Amino acid sequence: MFLRRVAIVAALLAGGAAAASAPPTVATFGTIRRLVRERDATPKVVLADVLRLPHTHALGSISDLRGEITILDGTAWLSYPPARTGGRPKVVVSTDSREQAGFLVAAQVAPGQWRKAKVGEALSSDGLEAALRGRIEQAGLGGADVPFRIDGRFSTLTLAIVDGRLLPAGARTPEAIKQANRLDQHSDVDGTLIGFFAAAADERFTHPDSRVHVHAVVTSARATGHARTFTLAPGATLWLPDRL
């Protein structure tokens, strides 16, 4: 059973590897639509199965809406909401986690598959989608689901960590999910955004009316979560997949 699970995950992530002109395959385990509209946060994949594949990048939520998942080049950053109001999130960093995702979007991108570009202007959460759309089209990746990474200095950063205990029974709207979050504020810190740009705003791995889903990792603060709002200082580094 264990080997079968790993084989299934590997097959999903490697689905487009044979196409020499294609970007890395983006695989989803569960969908945002099912998570929000059907309240389906049941386990979809064991993180250890995903982490065993080299150079995996991913984001999602822990099963039963117990927290957030960010995977940065094969290392999982898991953020659990504070046990009490005013407390700090609990963050666990692991390369072999037995946790399960209620939703996950993932791709394998090796170091040599990234193309590097500098972002000369300040970049905000409000302007991220438009900025990425233009750069993705210029890179010849239009029409595909595209993983991306941005390294830089955050002037401000608000991380959201889902807490299913705050979600009213029967709530099935994006706004209800948004309200069931604990917020973690940071400023003037170096960090990394891990995200996915969708070929279409179809709620597979993005929220309604959006084509971008992005998480952040702040190593110095041992923090991660959904990047709800942020401002990146000029000079950030954007990494997009190369066509290999």
Image (cartoon, rainbow, N blue to C red):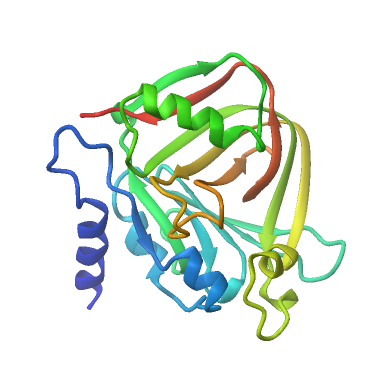
The answer to whether residue 118 is seen in the rendering is yes
Report the front residue among 200 and 162: 200
**Left/right of residue 2 with respect to residue 60 in the rendered view:** left
Q: Residue at x 70, y 62 (%)?
A: 178
Report the front residue among 102 and 77: 102
Q: Position of residue 104 (x, y in %)?
A: 44, 60
Q: Is residue 65 above or below residue 55?
A: below
Q: Is residue 200 above or below residue 178?
A: above
Locate residue 61: give its quadrant. Answer: bottom right
Q: Position of residue 130 (x, y in %)?
A: 55, 32
Locate residue 68: give its quadrant. Answer: bottom right
- Picture quarter with the N terminus: bottom left
Q: Position of residue 221 (x, y in %)?
A: 70, 42
Report the front residue among 217 and 166: 166
Q: Position of residue 197 (x, y in %)?
A: 45, 42
**In the displayed image of the protein, which residue is found farthest to the bottom?**
169
Q: Residue at x 77, y 71 (%)?
A: 83
**Left/right of residue 234 with respect to residue 192 in the rendered view:** right
- Picture quarter with the C terminus: top left
Q: Residue at x 35, y 23 (%)?
A: 139
**In the displayed image of the protein, which residue is found farthest to the top?**
120
Q: Residue at x 54, y 28 (%)?
A: 131
The answer to whether residue 224 is seen in the rendering is no
Number of callouts: 0
**Left/right of residue 85 with respect to residue 201 in the rendered view:** right
**Left/right of residue 16 with respect to residue 155 in the rendered view:** left
